Image: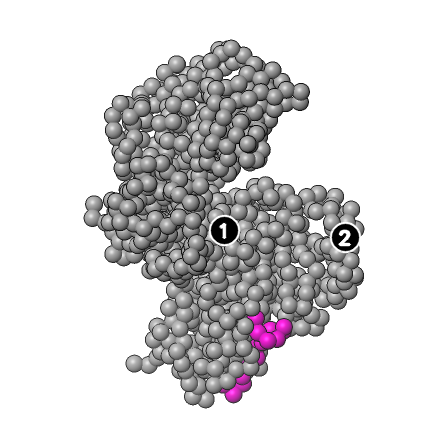
Amino acid sequence: MALERYDIAVIGAGVIGCAIARAFTLDGAKVVVLEKAADVLDGASKGNSAILHTGFDAPEGSLEQRCVAEGHAEYLSIREGLGLPLDPCGALVLAWNAEEEARLPALLAQGHANGVRDATPLTAAQIRSEEPNLSPRLRAGFRVPGESLIDPWSAPHAYLLQALLNGATLLRNAEVTGGQHDGTDWHLDTAAGPLRAGLVINAAGLWGDLLDERLLGQRDFTIRPRKGQFVVYDKSAAALARHILLPVPTEKTKGIVLCRTAFGNLLVGPTAEDQEDRVTAALVPDTLAALRAKGEEILPRLRDHEVTSLYAGLRPATQYKEYRIKAHPDRAMITVGGIRSTGLSSALGTAKHVRALAETLGHRAAPLADPVTPRLPNISATAPRDCHAPGHDGLICPCEEVTRREVEAALTGPLAPNTLAGLKRRTRVTMGRCQGFYCSAALARLTEGRLAQPMTGPTDRMED
Amino acid sequence: MTRIAIIGAGPTGLSAAATLASAGHAVTVIEREPEPGGIPRHCGHSPYGMREYRRLLSGRAYARRLAATAATAGAQIRLSTHVTALHPGGRIDLLTPDGPETLTPDRVLLAMGCRESSRAARMIGGTKPGGVLNTGALQGLVYLDHLTPFRRPVILGTEMVAFSALLTCRHAGIRPVAMVEPGPRPIARFPAALLPKALGVPLLTRTQVTAIEGEDRVRAIHLATPKGARRIEADGLILTGLFRPETQLLRPGPVLLDPGTGGPQIDQYGRCSDPAYFAAGNLLRGVETAGHCWAEGRAVAQAVLADLEGHLPAPETGCALTTGAPLRYVLPQRIVTGDLPPAFPQLYLRLAEPARGTLLLTAPETQAALGQIDSRPERRLSLPLPAPSVAAAEVTLRQP
């Protein structure tokens, strides 16, 4: 039997893979997305700071800067159609000592050079009139109005769902175990069976270098996972800051951010800790305590608020600061690697860049005349939620106001989750203050037999 | 007929509802769960009901009985209904299965109870696999849904509820591998503390849970013991106790909260800083027994009745009480001036750390001894309610 053939195989269903799958599908290509985990967004994309950056602080003339700027612009143009939230709160870059203050003019000039022309300097007094809860140690800063808060999971879900509804195929639990290029097509072996593809896109994130090695026998970079730990404060703390509060960035990291989230909490993080492990992002109490102390140094009143959750993510950093995006013309493959920390902002721009690279490899597009545009249910605090409309069948998660109807809807359709973690990302269920105290039992009942990886083991039904 | 809204259909709210409805008032109890009863509803084991019904009941039977008593008295219980905001003067916003709604009752009784601290609030490190639960969630799974989330968990904590978790495990055929207590001895009193030994579960004191290991499911629990780090193979972790008042609704106002209890500030009638609101039960300070809450609900309901008849002393009079280390809180936080018998006839105190000495009521110019204590943080202390003649006083401890 002939193997199923696709024009494009995208390996990795993180935010980058999802955006690339959408771009090629809308271009008329037959696309398959191969994800080795049980659900999408299970690697680097599962934990980030959920900010839509402008790229003001990216290196001038870099590919990263261009992808972030274009990704930002495209998000703004497509988000309403897809039902994606935006909280255009703007950011303040804050200097806390003389050294940081001295670096502000150059950073502002860099922002202007990067096309972020509306960034404007502010005195400490001007900043405190807008952010009265900031510590009085503040020296100076500047405003970047375009920095915004978004939902880090609905966005990639929307990209992938649009691809799926327009003909793309998603295979989960489908690790690519090997492959050969026969001069025309790739023959890929996957955990979900073999298939053929005209062009392979490596969007494998934390595994990108190893996948290059597996398919090409060589790699141009080495992933050095960089862990970021975060502390999420209760929704009661969200009123403490109106803007995204950014530090003066360093060569290695954008530094520790304080901001509200699209879900109405207040976030402090991330740390930047290099490690070898590509899978485990362990929470470390001492580091988290230091993060809290840092947050409370900037916003002293944070002390009065409870911590709702802790999380840690891994960024696929490499030995290079710049993205590692490279076409391999003789092997019909494009590597999209080293999308370090700006992936959520740059994904749509990165996808555009990859599409252009594919053309240089001979890929020809015939854009869909009338593509389907799905509208994602709003789970952010920026617009009314499902619970405000009648017939929602009760709240299953009171803390996050998640309705039974929302969970039912999330459990159906082409992008239904396989895991509880996936269901949380789609609905926010159990992600609130009580962290499952009230809703775990009802949720286990509602999802029984409907998640490939159940909340309780398959043999765990007690005899009544 | 006066309209009274009660938020929460646990033992506190339901006993208050029965009292107020029996007196002829229009009582609406608002409950976000699909069934009334509160925490006892999740609890399949005894003992409940001795104080209230003079018989031994399981938690579920007790919950059913409380709800039936309130309903028979004429209270309306609205289920699957959430309160989303409280406004000054008692106006409350609801989210019902049919959408938003606003109520304008004459009085509101806050009886939202408490919940156990989450993993995040305890700052436990490691990964975030499935199989990490509070007792509340465990009991829901076991008794309501007949599911077992794990087979060999570690139990963290030794408050009374931890032994309830142990009984729940036993009921479900779950065999805990250890019970872990950061302090030097179990917090719950004899005879509960004998239970682990009777069931063959090692009790490790002076031990902290430092990290959770595992990807999809828990694989091991990492401990810091007096003898150093230790790794125990386990497939779950039960986080028990460290109850916190369920105050998410109260954060934006209009009632003032007490940083010591974490709950609303009240006077000896259970009246909050906005006098349209009263509060009772575990919302005030974390966990007490269901029977204690039931009695408190009744007592505060009597105060509400007195208030509706104009007999309650004026609010914001009398003496405001504060405290500080080594004391964690005093309750009530205000003693208003008046002769009406109080809903809280005693002053409740908690220590933040083990301490002994003489409790003093201290104000500028005056100091009065309230009594001697020698106690630990887990014990509830009570003293006769003082009647201070000053506008503000601090409860302090003179240590020897």
Out of B214 and B99, give the one closest to the viewer. Answer: B214
Q: Quadrant of residue A150?
A: bottom right
Give the secondary structure at mark 1: loop
| Residue B92 higher or lower than A62, as above or below | above
Q: Viewer-proximal residue, A310 or A407?
A: A310
Count residues near mark 1 (Cα–Cα under 10 Å), then give few for <14, some for 14-19, many for 20+: many
**Residue at 67% in and 20% down:** B365
- State the SS at label 2: loop
**Which residue is the site of mark 1?**
B123
Q: Is residue A87 magenta?
A: no
Q: Residue placed at 49% from the left, 47% from the top?
A: B121
Taking A141 as reference, is B92 left or right?
A: left
Q: Is residue A389 left or right of residue B151?
A: right
Residue stretch in magenta: A317-331
Q: Residue at x 58, y 23 (%)?
A: B361
Q: Amino acid at mark 1?
A: Met
Q: Chain of mark 2?
A: A
Tags 2 and 1 both on a single chain: no
Q: Classify the position of the C terminus of chain A by image quarter.
A: top left
For residue A73, say whether it is visible: no
Q: Find residue B271 and report its horizontal and vertical position in percent.
A: 52, 22
- Image quadrant in which the N terminus of chain A is located: bottom left
Residue A139 is tagged as 2
Judging from the image, the colouring scheme is one colour
Q: Position of residue A205 (x, y in %)?
A: 51, 70
Of B68 and A352, nearer the camera is B68
Which residue sits at x=70%, y=60%? Answer: A248
Q: In the rendered structure, which amino acid carries the disc numbered 2?
A: Arg
Res A187 quadrant in image? bottom left
Q: CA distance from mark 2 to mark 1?
A: 32 Å
The chain containing the residue under callout 1 comes to B
